[in-house]
Amino acid sequence: MFDIGSSELLLIVIVAIVVIGPKDLPRALYKVGQIVGKARGMARHFRTGIDAMVREVELQELEKKWAEQNKRIMAEHPPETEAIEDQSEPVAEASANPDYAGAHMTPLATPAPAITPKNDEAA
């Protein structure tokens, strides 16, 4: 990212030891680590926000595309409401006239005769 070579890094370490001193160097490195961590967190937060906005725009574009395709398909293949209405007429007639529904139906099974058990005590 910064394109720092090993010789440049060695020079930075030597200058840090001379300027900060070996006693305070760990504390300074800790602070630098905290600052770098916060910077990375802010960059990550910014990146996720941008990614969310890009995804939202892509979804809106896809929804527009799907809506256009849906309109085209619906124009090419109109719904067949007449066929549905023709099929619903017998149902409407049967529900309006209960005798009509019962007259054309045959029972699925004949009822079994009632059998009375023999009473052994009566004999």
Image (cartoon, rainbow, N blue to C red):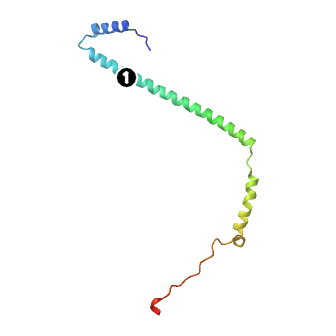
Q: Residue at x 28, y 10 (%)?
A: 20
Q: Could you say which is closer to the camera, residue 113 or residue 22? A: 113
Residue 83 % position (x, y): 75, 54
Quadrant of the image containing the N terminus: top left
* Left or right of 122, for residue 63: right
Q: Which of the 4 quarters of the picture holds residue 23?
A: top left
Give the residue type that dot 1 points to. Answer: Gly
Determine the residue located farthest toward the bottom in the rendered image.
123
Q: Is residue 8 above or below residue 110?
A: above
What secondary structure is marked by label 1? helix
Q: Could you say which is closer to the camera, residue 87 or residue 72? A: 87
Q: Is residue 45 above or below residue 71?
A: above
Where is mark 1, residue-wise? 37
Q: Which of the 4 quarters of the picture holds residue 82?
A: bottom right
Residue 104 % position (x, y): 72, 70
Q: How many tags in the picture?
A: 1
Q: Residue at x 27, y 16 (%)?
A: 26
Q: Residue at x 48, y 28 (%)?
A: 48
Q: Residues within 10 Å of mark 1 (few under 14, many from 20)?
A: few
Q: Residue at x 76, y 58 (%)?
A: 86
Residue 62 % position (x, y): 62, 34
Q: Which of the 4 quarters of the picture holds residue 37?
A: top left
